[in-house]
Every structure is written in C-alpha cells, then in structure tokens.
C-alpha cells in the first residue's frame, strides 16, 4: 500500500509542477512573439522551431514509456494466467495485477512531458532575468 501512495504522490507532484511550468512557458513565448513583431531574429526562429520539435519528441517518448509500462503489466497478467493453468490452487493467492498498475503507466507517460516543461520554464526564466 505504501508503494501505491508513492506512485500517487509522484503523479500528483508531477502534475502540479507541470500545471505551474506550462503556463509560464506559454506566457514567455507569447510575450516573446508579441514583442518581436512580424520579423524574428535567428535566435527566436530557433526557439519557435525547437518548440514544435521538442513537443513532438516529448510526446513520442511519453507514448513509448506508457506502451512499455503497459507491456510490463500485460506480461505480469499473462504469466499469472499461465501459472494458474499449471497450479490452479496457488494462482488465487496472488493478485494478477497490482492495484497501482494504472498509476505506473500514467507516471511513465507523464515523466518526459514533465521533464521538458519544467526544464523550459527554468531556462526561459533564467533568460528573462539576464535581459
């Protein structure tokens, strides 16, 4: 049970940090676009092109991490099922799935997006203070 709470707390912490970081990044980038006008410098063009690319990478990493964790959950279920065929009496003493399996899957998927958004918020905040 303690493990389930740690997965839940980790998810809650990541969601909270993501909820704070994402609006900061959006605000900074919209302000940057508005202040520059219609002609962007090469640094701004790199930032805006990178913005699209990093989202694609982060979400692909997220999907792959969730697929990998889901595969692990399905593997556990399959091994439990196969074991129940061999030893039916012993199979019912173990639960086929941990109650926190969905938390592990969501945590795995949230990690890459959280990591990138928080890193961007810190980087853009540092850049803002340097100006």
Image: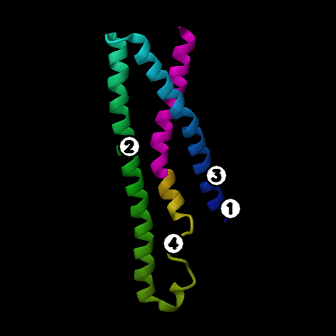
Residues at marks 3 and 1, CA–CA distance in whole angstroms = 10 Å
Write down the residue under mark 3: 9
Residues at marks 4 and 3, CA–CA distance in whole angstroms = 20 Å
Sequence order check, earlier mark of 3 and 1: 1
Where residue 98 sits: x, y (%)? 55, 69
User: Residue visible at 40% across and 75% down?
Assistant: 78
* Residue range highlighted in magenta: 108-131
Write down the residue under mark 4: 97
Secondary structure of the residue carrying numbered label 3:
helix
Residues at marks 1 and 4, CA–CA distance in whole angstroms = 16 Å
Above or below, 92 against 109 in this view is: below
Which of labels 4 and 2 is toward the front? 2
- Give the class, few, some or many, for how many residues have Cα within 10 Å of label 3's Cα (few <14, many ≥20): few
Write down the residue under mark 2: 59
Secondary structure of the residue carrying numbered label 2:
helix
Which of labels 3 and 1 is toward the front? 3
């Amino acid at each position: 049970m303690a493990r389930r709470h740690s997965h839940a707390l980790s998810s809650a912490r990541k969601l909270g940090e993501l909820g704070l970081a994402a609006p900061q990044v959006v605000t900074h980038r919209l302000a940057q676009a508005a202040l520059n006008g219609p002609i962007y410098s090469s640094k701004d063009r790199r930032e805006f092109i990178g913005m699209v690319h990093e989202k694609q990478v982060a979400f692909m990493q997220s999907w792959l991490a969730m697929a990998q964790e889901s595969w692990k959950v399905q593997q556990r279920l399959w091994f439990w099922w196969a074991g129940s065929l061999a030893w039916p009496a012993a199979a019912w003493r173990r639960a086929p799935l941990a109650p926190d399996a969905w938390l592990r899957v969501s945590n795995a998927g949230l990690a890459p997006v959280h990591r990138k958004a928080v890193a961007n918020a810190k980087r853009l905040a540092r850049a803002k203070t340097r100006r």
